[in-house]
Image: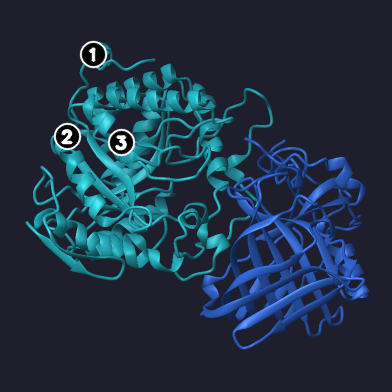
Amino acid sequence: MIGGTADVQALAAQAPTVADLRTEPLTLTDADVFKVSFELGWEGYATLLPPALIPTNPPYATWLFLRVPDSPLGAFGLAQLQIGCRAGSAARGFVARTFIDNSRAGQALTERWGITTQPARIKLHRQYDAVQAAVAVNDRPILEVVARDALVLSAPDVSFNALMLLAHTSLGLRLIDIDLQVTVHQAERLKPSCTSFDAGAWRDTRIRPTNPIAATALLGDVTLPALRYVCDPLISALDGIEEIPEAEPAESGQRHGA
Amino acid sequence: MKFGLFFELTVPAPYASEQEQQVYRNAIEQAVLADQLGFDYIWAVEHHFLLGYSHCPAPEVFLTAVAMVTKQIRLGHGAIVCIPEMNHPIRVAERAAALDIVSNGRLDVGTARSSTWTELSGFRIDPDTTKKTWDEYVHVLPKMWMQERFEYDGYSFSMPERAIIPKPVQKPHPPLWVAVSTKGTDIDAAERGLGCLGIAVTGLANQERATKEYRQRIRYCEPVGGAVNENVSTLNWLYCAEDSDIAAATALPMVRDFRLINSQLLWTREAYPTPAYQYRERPNLNPPEQRRAAVPGAHLEIPEGLAIGDPARVIREIKRWESIGVDLINFFVNSSELIPQAQVLDSLRLFAREVIPQFGKREPASDAAGVQAAGVQR
């Protein structure tokens, strides 16, 4: 079985530290959520993923935009690139990069869930039957997406993959599993097209969106959960999954599949 | 209880042509032996672009090859993808009838609509439409086989009056099934008088519930064909050895391998939001059944319901499926050729000798001469 071939030590050098994995959940209510998926070119795809995670066929990626009007972290906009993959047999999105327009919110996301953020201007604009989304760094666009031909969906039609990202933790260098929960109030499916994309700004110049899959625009409540699992980035997730102990690692903690 | 073999034709990396050829040869050899040993079915899938997972895009070709070297075993499409961009319904009817002729009336026709974005998008198929096209196919195929001439003006295709030929050997037509992997499709099967071709390894409790509902609903079905095919089949893993620990050590890696390569597929329900494909439940990261023993050589626990172990254990597990009303169990016998072919064949022989007779079936005939005569290359 072929897992990813990313240089984990190189990723580790840029990975955040999550001092305490026992975080409280946070619900972002009435958020505008825009999810856009594209297939990716095969070249270099496996190098985006650590060995614990398995590539999909075909490769694909999802951009997740959030516009949160109010929250305990304040109002903010966020844009995140997730590389589609598998942890064992579970569908996951490996976080490549996250941009945010509220530094305080960004700091909290990093400290509590290991979501490293970079500052950017985030645009998420809904029209009657279209959505426009864009990310700009220092006034330079690094992503522009427009999606049209909205079709109303019901909540069971929509799904979200959990996220995984690399972080330094009290258990060592680990992939943190963030099982995002979304309560959908209303949703539409649209046809996306990408008009501008700077792959290097999103981590790797070889990231190449090809065949558009779908876009989903919804209004809902997004919950960043309490963390339950981590896994060793170097071995198959089937073998390297650990349940986050309720007490400090010195006092308890048993590794599954060792 | 009936027994079959189910072929995905998984190919190990790096997927070289020589490896593909060996997978085909091994599968045909297994089919020949299964025929001699008293198995009831050989099923072959239809998949496209699924590197490693299934190199079987032309099941009618594979099944024809099997038909030419077998005598009694039934041959099943597991299943034909009923979408015009992949298979025009006229061609489905024609090819199935031809295969029924060359197999002397041994064909079963499974129908499906594909569930991966990989395949649907490869043919530029709109996922929203696949349930409708599938339903259209299962209604028109029997008519194409039974009517002298056929004309049609429908959702996904139309045609002027023509004689669709040849006609199948079996009358009124080959038994029809639908591939079932999600809740709701079993109800579709019952309402149309179709057999349930289980294509996901499911648990006993889920299967019992689904089978009970199927049996209730099929009593009031409006059959799409000339006959009702009331049958429930499930998918399972088979490895039979004299020692259960040896069977577990040999077979559980193939179960794990298949689960991982299956997970690589990009499911439509994951990528493309549509009422036509919905998530059953979100998978989490806690796979207790996948944990390896902490100590090398320690006893590996075989998950309940799997036909892996010594004959006594395999009999016990199959009886559980029989007790909840399953009519047919189709077996995977390998994945990515992890188990050497000789061991797969030995497992089939032991199963036939010790297990099949427990389910009211004839003793298997000697197989050695048959394999030679079939000209199957090792």
Label whose residue precedes the other's in the sequence (3 or 1): 3
Residue most extreme to the left? B148
The colour of chain A is blue
| Discs 2 and 3 carry the same chain letter | yes
For label 1, the crowd category at 10 Å Cα-Cα, with few meaning under 14, some 14 to 19 and many 20 or more, is few
Q: Are marks 1 and 2 in contact (CB under 8 Å)?
A: no
**Which residue lies at the image location 58% right of the left edge and 60% below the top edge?**
B282
Residue B216 seen in the current view? no
How far is the residue under mark 1 from the one under mark 2? Answer: 19 Å
To which residue does mark 3 refer? Answer: B61
To which residue does mark 2 refer? Answer: B102
The quarter of the picture where the N terminus of chain B appears is top left
- The kind of residue tagged 2 is Val
| Chain letter for the residue marked with disc 1 in the picture | B
Percent of width and height locating residue B136: 27, 65
Percent of width and height locating residue A128: 61, 88
- The kind of residue tagged 3 is Val
Quick one: which chain is cyan?
A: B
Of residues B311 and B286, the one nearer the viewer is: B286
To which residue does mark 1 refer? Answer: B373
**Image-based side of B98 in relation to A33, left or right:** left
How far is the residue under mark 2 from the one under mark 3? Answer: 12 Å
**Image-based side of A238 in relation to A15, left or right:** left
| Image: B287 above or below B352 | below
Name the element at disc 3.
helix
Of residues A21 and A56, the one nearer the viewer is: A56
